[in-house]
Image (cartoon, grey):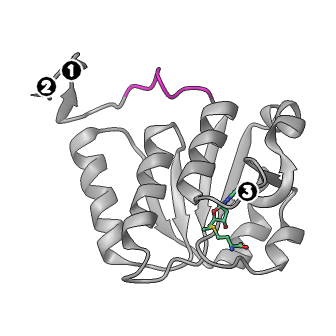
Amino acid sequence: MEIYVLRLGHRVGRDKRISTHVALTARALGAKGIYFDVYDDSVFDSVKDVVERWGGDFFIEKVEWRSFLKKFNGLKVHLTMYGLPLIEKIDEIRKADRILVVVGAEKVPPEVYEMCDSNISIGNQPHSEVAALAVFLDRVLGKTFDLKFKNAKIKVVPSERGKNVIEL
Ligand SMILES: C[S@@+](CC[C@H](N)C(=O)[O-])C[C@H]1O[C@@H](n2cnc3c(N)ncnc32)[C@H](O)[C@@H]1O
């Protein structure tokens, strides 16, 4: 299964940190890449720098979101607190070969609810796109603890205390 993320509504400057965290979470939990509807060099550069040092082939790309979402070949899942609980739809979602997960920043354009195949909630309380994406990826893909990142220049050696990072 391949999962891609579409991040909508990034506000340049204001959302730099959270959008970077959305992208890094997508990468670290096994998504193939992330699409943004807005280009912000500080986010794109930070993410590319992580890929360069920590490995793997995760990509970050700018798209025109309406035509991209319309044409995406696969299951389109919008994460929203107003949607159906993930556990009710997870068996259906897991059958897909390709999934595009859509997460917002501020208010998502209403047509997104119509353009996506499913509107899915991670609980029905307001929280964060980072948390929603993390739970979705862990539940649907389930690779959080098994991923390997090819061509990494550095890696963590897990340890009980302290920080052990080695150069490869
Ligand atoms: C800070 S929220 C903004 C929500 C905004 N008030 C709205 O009505 O769309 C940013 C994003 O986090 C995600 N999100 C927040 N809470 C969620 C939940 N309980 N379930 C699924 N996604 C959630 C959604 O993708 C949302 O667009």
Q: Quadrant of residue 90?
A: top right
Ligand 1 quadrant?
bottom right
Among numbered discs 1 and 2, the one appearing first in the sequence = 1
Tell me if mark 3 has few (under 14), some (14-19) or many (20+) residues whose alpha carbon lies within 10 angstroms of its own. few
Across and down, in percent, residue 19 comes to 45, 65
Q: Amino acid at mark 3?
A: Gln
User: Mark 1 = which residue?
Assistant: 157
| Residue 105 located left or right of residue 155 | right
Label number found at residue 104: none
| Residue 52 located left or right of residue 77 | left
Q: Is mark 3 within 8 Å of ligand 1?
A: yes
Residue at point 39%, 62% (across, down): 20
Tell me if mark 1 has few (under 14), some (14-19) or many (20+) residues whose alpha carbon lies within 10 angstroms of its own. few
Which residues make up the magenta segment?
A: 142-148
| Residue 128 located left or right of residue 78 | left
Seen in the picture, residue 59 relative to 134 is either above or below; the reply is: below
- Report the residue that reaches farthest toward the left: 167
Q: How many angstroms separate mark 1 from mark 3 (CA)?
A: 36 Å
Q: Nearer the viewer, residue 124 or 90?
A: 124
Can residue 14 be seen here? The reply is yes
Marks 2 and 1: in contact by CB < 8 Å? yes
Front disc: 2 or 3: 3
Q: Nearer the viewer, residue 153 or 89?
A: 89
User: Mark 3 = which residue?
Assistant: 125
Residue at point 44%, 79% (across, down): 39
Can residue 168 be seen here? The reply is no
Per the image, label 1 sits on a secondary structure element best described as loop
